[in-house]
Amino acid sequence: MTTVLIPAYEPDERLLQLIADLKAACRCGIVVVDDGSGEAYGELFHSARQAGCIVLTHDHNLGKGRALKTGFAFLKKAGETGGIVCADSDGQHLPADIVRIAAAVDEHPDHIVLGCRHFTGRVPLRSRFGNQATRLVYTLTTGRFVMDTQTGLRGFSSAMLDWLCSIPGDRFEYEMNMLLQARGDGYPIHEVPIDTVYLEKNKSSHFRPVADSIRIYAPILKFCSSSVLSAGLDFLLLFVLQFVTGSLLAAVVGSRLCSAIFNYAMNRRYVFVKKDAPRLIESAPKYFALVALIMGLNYGLLILFHEMVGIPLFIAKLLTEGSLFVFSYWCQRKFVFRSRSQAGGRPPKAYVKRYKKV
């Protein structure tokens, strides 16, 4: 039997309506996680219990990611063997779509099932822009396209519960981290189209535009920060070494070498952090080979854009640096700092865990 997991923070009557509609639409268990809504919402959660739901409670607000992990941990401890579908409490996920996700989990038990909106019709600007931005970040980061990276309607098999509890993040970034880790940990994604529903221009959303966006875009932001700091170091050392040595060539080579070493150390330590990260002797040669490749590509693209196509040098430089920024990020994530288990061709831990009894 499928269990529907609903994280809820300061919900309204739409939560109770969703519960009633689910009870009428299918035979499923329902677990609601009260993420520290407070005493004012006690009666509403009591009504959810009266309707046959299991209600788990946080003493104070810990975030959507933590609420989901509380639910996953409960289901794991309870010995859940069926599928799990996560849905939002604000009525934006229709019972019919929840049932379709549950069916897709049964058909694709080794996949993460996403209920994907197509953002047609009247969609709040914040929601449209937010999804486009996170979709771009996801594509740049993984090289894969997902229509709706922010969907809260997701389905999983019970075999994934250990993995779901281990994903970092306590707030909205948890769902993005899940997608970023999925493929590398052996979980492909299956998309199911669902209706796009926004009530009152998505006013009930607890998404904090600044704080939660920073958490979601952290992988790209950290890479940008590392690149900016490295460029600043390169700029500073160029003048210092020129003053000390009196040689422009020595200053250029020395500053670029030092900034590259600094950038490598930053990316290895803070940007591409993985549990089974490659050793220094494995990643360093790849990184500096990439540096050499990018230097060659930089020159080649400038020749292409400026001299062959006729684009002004300033614009050609912007196009070149932008293209190489994306290329560098993708290469470092995909090849330079690739985890040892994947680089060695061994099955990801997730696959080993799921199939060890076969």
Image: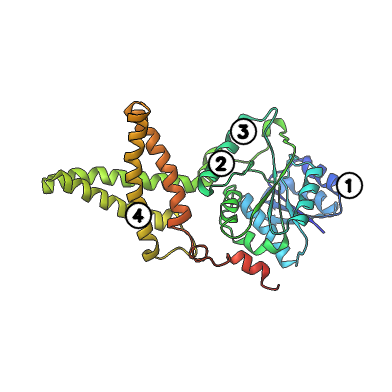
Residue carrying label 4: 289
Residue 134's spot in the image, x, y percent? Answer: 56, 41
Q: Looking at this view, name the residue that lies furthest to the bottom.
A: 357
Q: Is residue 59 visible?
A: no
Residue at 35%, 26% (x, y): give it: 310
> What is the crowding at mark 3: few (fewer than 14 residues within 10 Å), some, or many (at least 20)?
some
Residue at 17%, 46% (x, y): give it: 249
Q: Nearer the viewer, mark 3 or mark 1?
A: 3
| Mark 3 → mark 1, Cα distance in angstroms | 32 Å
Q: Marks 3 and 2: in contact by CB < 8 Å?
A: no
Circle 2: residue type: Thr
| Mark 2 → mark 4, Cα distance in angstroms | 30 Å
Q: Marks 1 and 3: in contact by CB < 8 Å?
A: no
The N terminus lies in quadrant: bottom right
As helix, strand or loop, the secondary structure at mark 4 comes to helix
Residue carrying label 1: 24
Of callouts 4 and 1, the N-terminal one = 1
Of callouts 2 and 4, the N-terminal one = 2
As helix, strand or loop, the secondary structure at mark 1 comes to helix
